[in-house]
Image (cartoon, helix red, strand yellow):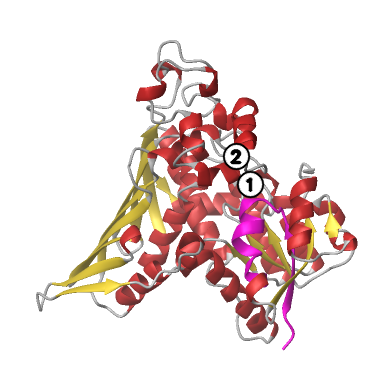
Amino acid sequence: MKPITAVVIGAGDRGARAYAPYALDNLHEFRIVGVAEPNTERRRKFAEQFALTAQQQFDSWESLLGNERHAEVAIICTLDRMHLQPTLRALELGYHVLLEKPMSPVPAECVEMELAAKRHNRLLTICHVLRYTAFWSSLKREIDRGAIGDIASIQLNENVGNMHMSHSFVRGNWRNSDESSPMILQKSCHDMDILAYLMGEPCTRISSFGSLMHFHEGNRPEGAPLRCIEGCPAEHVCQYHAPRYYLGEGIGWARKITDDHTKEGIIKALWEGPYGKCVYQTDNNVVDHQVVNMEFASGATATFSMCGFTHDNTRIVQVMGTKGDIRGNMEDDAFTLHDFVTKEKRVVHIHASAAGHGGGDADIVRSFIKEVRDFEAGMVTESKSSASVSVRSHLMAFAAEASRLDGGRSIDLQAYYDELAGAAVQPHVHEKHC
């Protein structure tokens, strides 16, 4: 059996480190045959790692997705606002597409990609990797076998972790929704998707509240300079002091702020890049805490809370059913099931991979490869996290943000989708992304 071939569009952290590496250990089933990446150094390193020739390297998605198809699969990991055009072009050329989440920060574009995949009869799978982890897959199996009866309500907490919050959403690429996506979409569309996955039915209504409470100019320590490295009077009492973090306990995160991983390289990045800025003096505007209320088709409800002020970085869930409940912490690799009838308590221990997202990064690639083979053999029509499935959970995030910005009003999801689908099928010209 020949390996499935793939091109990678966007060789940043997710493209180069999360999905493509599956090919290095599984050459018998998956092979990278091309890359498009505008950053010369990233492109060179990726090409070296995957033994790509000069002819297999491109400096833009436009040049790779020209007039011919180079592989069976396109893995698209460009910035959020650059997903639409390469995805539409790849589908048009006949690629099956594995697309990093979120699909797009524009709701109508998400629907448009879903409809394009159907029109071209190609798989479009969204990287909602939590569906593929041992923790959530095992929990879903218990629900599906009726272990706790019918779900009445779910509570899901996302503990972002204060340093992860400051790195990614105050200083980092996703700090400003005008340039990337709202927090509920960028960080928590995983959670909207998991809630939809566990419920197994459509979300019908949604409302939300939240704000940027802490990371703003009003909380800047007196005398604090723009960059921590300039010498801040609050250095010893501020947990976000950049040099102490990135040269100390957070040195592992430094590989994300510079390609030069020496201490000299890190210091240079703190002087020149956004990660050296005071967390109270950036151009961030995404929320640092948010709650979402949901009602589903059966009348079951769910509540979700995202908060950037926690010591840990994990997800904590409680699923309450008519015959029992389940409580779990993803960081513990275990959940506990209580049976209301027998009074039994059963702890389910998960064998979680040490790889990215608890093994979800590798497992989604493995699953996608099988789905591509099965699709070509006429055995499947959609993937586990297809665009059709993922658009619905994306719209939960979009609707939550719309509700938050409108005083927490309740939004009807079906009416919201119908309006977007109508807009997506109207002929219009897209701005071309470079």
Where's residue 86, x and y in %? 75, 54
Nearer to me, 384 or 280: 280
Q: Is residue 99 above or below residue 218?
A: below
Q: Residue furthest front?
A: 263
Look at the image and say whether residue 8 sits in the magenta stretch: yes
Nearer to me, 106 or 48: 48
The secondary element bearing badge 1 is classed as helix
Q: Which mark is residue 345?
A: none
Q: Is residue 348 left or right of residue 260?
A: left
Mark 1 surroundings within 10 Å by alpha-carbon count, few (fewer than 14), some (14 through 19), many (20 or more): some
Badge 2 is on which residue?
180
Kindly tell me whether residue 426 is visible in this rendering: no
Extent of the magenta region: 1-23
Disc count in the image? 2
The secondary element bearing badge 2 is classed as loop
Q: Is residue 232 left or right of residue 57?
A: left
Kindly tell me whether residue 55 is visible in this rendering: yes
Look at the image and say whether residue 2 sits in the magenta stretch: yes
Residue contact between numbered discs 1 and 2, judged by CB atoms under 8 Å:
yes
Where's residue 237, x and y in %? 35, 24
Nearer to me, 248 or 3: 248
Nearer to me, 253 or 140: 253
Badge 1 is on which residue?
80
